Image (tube, rainbow, N blue to C red):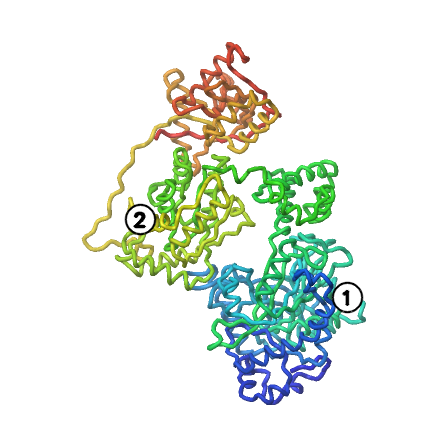
Amino acid sequence: MLPLKNKAPLKSILPCRFSPNKSINQVFETFASSPNTFHSLKVPKYRIHQHFSSSSRFAKFHSQTSHNINRSTKESKMENVTADTSTGSLAAKYKASTDYAKDAVGMQVPYIPQDTQHTSQVVRQLEDSHKKGKGGHKTFSCKKTRFAVKNSPTKIEVDSWRFQEWDYKRRDLPTYARGLFTTRNKNGVAEIVTRGYDKFFNIDEVPETVWGNIYERTKGPYELTLKENGCIIFISGLEDDTLLVCSKHSTGDRADAAQSHASVGERHIERQLARLGKTKADLARELRTRNVTAVAELCDDNFEEHILAYGPDEAGLYLHGMNLNLPEFATYPSALVQKFAEDWGFIKTALIVIDDVHEVKAFLEEVAETGAHGGRDVEGFVIRCHMTHDSTKKPYADWFFKYKFEEPYLMYRQWRECTKALISGKQPRYKKHAKITEEYLLYARKRLAADRNLAKLYQQNHGIIKLRNDFLEYKNLKGADAANWEALHGDGGAATEVSRDVILVPIATIGCGKTTIGVALGNLFGWGHIQNDNITGPKRPPRFTKALLDELDDKQAVFADRNNAQKHERKQLLTDVKSQHLSAKLVALHFVHNDIDTIRRVTQDRVFQRGDNHQTIQAASDKNKVVGIMEGFINRFEPLDPEREPDSGFDAVIDLDPTAGSRQNLEIVVKELHRLYPQFVTEIPSAEAMDEAITAALEGYIPDLRHTIPDRGKNKNKLKPGHQSAQPKQQKKKPLEYMGVDVETKDVLSALEKTFANVGNEQSRFYKQLLGTRRVQPKFHVTLMHRAGAKENPALWQRYTALQESDGAIHSDGKLGTMEVQLERVVYDDRVMSIIVRLVPNPEDVNINADNSELPAKPKWECVNKVAHITVGTRSDNIKPKESNDLLARWLEEGSGSQTGINDLLIEGKPLLKGTVRGVLSK
């Protein structure tokens, strides 16, 4: 144990029984066997990884010590509670304090040396996982990046190790450090030089952070530190006295940024040390002597703005942790962290201590109502306490969890992303706080138009907070009031008006119960159910989307029954639906994959129980093969992240537990849909009705179509004796149906929206009717020539047919060429709507006879229609798109107006769109 002021060499301060090569477990066992020595050392509390095997005596003493450390300061805080306490306000009762440093006086600092053998073993495991690349069915993956340490006189290099975020929920990682750097010392021995926190989770993010488990498995005191809103910085010392400053996964300058987080953090350290008359080498030696990494938050709006403001007086490095450089997690008590911050010029992170867990929850929920504490907005709290899964088998160990505030933090982040979309010329996307966000964007547009430099600075993360605060001042609102705007003033009815066109999208793996829930919802409400496994042949994803949209013609909602376990699958579905059906709402049913081992066990039990009653896996026939298939899905599963694309495209997310019963998850889905869209699910069915729906789904469901998943093993191409390979049946070649020019759906819809936004109700009525009845075409094209016109233009049809046969297979998307399409005018009556276009060919396509002056000029792409056009939509199914030709012929002869019943509008700006020439084959 190293006294706080002691400068003695390491071995002289350690009792002889503690060899520097002993592991932390061995140190704990020695404490357990010699309690007298343990007490004489006055060991303060440790932060111990939950997998340690420490003794119950140590844990008991640990808990008592940590409680006593904070009692004097905590009691002094309570004596100064203002009169507001009588109102019952916990936010007034508990004030964050930076005065706990005085409790560190007389305390001894935790010290545990690195076990070189154990560290080398961990590094070997990391190297193995790095060489394997992406994790297999039963392993994890780790990314390794090597950095040359800037200003190291001995040219030290360090390796950064980075796991995938979802791997931290596994049980088999060699370390759970989120931020880990290693090197080899002058003797070639591996050592940890920088060590971040073990990954800790938000409330309800994993089973351990559900409040029920926190009540049962943890005990106080509970230390709450403000969650600063910046970027994490690690500081440690190397053997050549170089101070190593790192961000989470890198160090030094970066080629892709003008200033790296690590470099800016290092400059802050230089300034704070200069004020104390100390050097970076002094700090490096101190940290290395202690075998620790200092963990701080870099908060500096001059460098990079986040969501919450840090002015010049608040900017700097907020120290909130001191971690021992060990594979297992061990950290200093908060009093020692604040004392170290005082001694070395860091900003102290404020701390609150609460004894009762129920009071902790009540306090957090009260502060969350405003998103502010101590007169300033905060992102949330990190809570340190003691936890065990079973106190009869394992002693309590230190444990972290976090409580992130949703508002106004999420609203601020939404405004930031919407503003950046505006600047980039993209459509801002938002789901919550719609009314106030619309007003903010209107204000932001005016400010951006008035100050062109503002956009440039905003993209560099400057001016974000000022623009937001200027808007709030303009509206005379506080952040919390803005976040509650819809609750106080209504949301304009956007969500409450949804009554149909809802697509339910499960995000799951095999055996989670998604099909059972889908069938049960159909039993309850008569909604549609499209099973992806029923779609066979090529181009299944777009055909799956088409089937869903077709189902919405007659059904109020549809269940999109496929796993959607990977982001690219969700992106395809979201993109295809949103481009074809603007008013559809996509609701994600996210089966949260936290405890993978339990999920694996529960889902395999379910699949084996149902035997062969599944479309793609027949568990009764080949169990080993089924396990392999299920493992593949679990390891490919990518959790939903509603803050990032593509998952930010979902209109709502309902989280479900894959280990819970389908009946329980069904009720959650129904109640959440009722809450989200009360006009869609107008009332919640009775418990009996839901029971019957689940029973019918479990007992009555039989797959319509079965698939055989091929064996992808090494011998997949070998035939068994006596078997002949089946000759593929030759398909009849499909003829060309028409040659056309495809244009982007979103560009056409955008032009139409702008055109009809500036006209009266009478002129826009038919367009709104087409939108409301989903009669707008899902995709738009200009027909150059249809096969029906082959007799009138045989030479041109023969040329188009020859081009399709020779070049149609060159590109996977069937592209034959490109040209530009200019939108000029919308023409419509009460039956059909068309856009008159001008075709602008590429220079090389203007005249295919340019090399032969004797032949007349002839463009490569010709349109045989009298008026080149795009059909926007028709009033009903019995009105075919080809009626556009008749409409435009009448318009040419008779014109527009009340007498002809034909309307026409100029398209604003006459936009020039990119077009792709493709041949479309007959069905």
Q: Quadrant of residue 197?
A: bottom right
In the image, 290 versus 126, the foreground residue is 290
Mark earlier in primary sequence (2, 1): 1
Which residue is painted at 63% across and 49% down in the image? 413
Asked if residue 238 lies left or right of residue 753, the reply is: right
456, above or below 179, in the image: above
In the image, 79 versus 191, the foreground residue is 79
Which residue is painted at 64% across and 88% down in the image? 40
Q: Can you name the residue that lies furthest to the front here?
A: 86
x, y percentage for residue 458?
69, 45
**For the residue marked with disc 2, what is the amino acid?**
Ala
Quadrant (top left/top right/bottom left/bottom right) for the C terminus? top left
**Numbered disc 1: secondary structure:** helix
**Numbered disc 2: secondary structure:** helix
Which residue is painted at 29% across and 60% down in the image? 623
**Image marks 2 and 1: residues in contact by CB distance under 8 Å:** no
* Circle number at residue 272: 1
Mark 2 → mark 1, Cα distance in angstroms: 69 Å
The number of callouts visible is 2
* Circle number at residue 449: none
Asked if residue 410 lies left or right of residue 211, the reply is: right
Question: Would you call the spot at circle 1 few (<14 residues within 10 Å), some (14-19), or many (20 or more)?
Answer: some
832, above or below 210, in the image: above
**For the residue marked with disc 1, what is the amino acid?**
Gln
x, y percentage for residue 228?
67, 60
In the image, 145 versus 221, the foreground residue is 221
x, y percentage for residue 873?
46, 25
Question: Would you call the spot at circle 2 few (<14 residues within 10 Å), some (14-19), or many (20 or more)?
Answer: some
x, y percentage for residue 442?
67, 37
- Residue bearing the label numbered 2: 696
Task: For residue 421, say whether it is visible.
Answer: yes
Q: Quadrant of residue 764?
A: top right
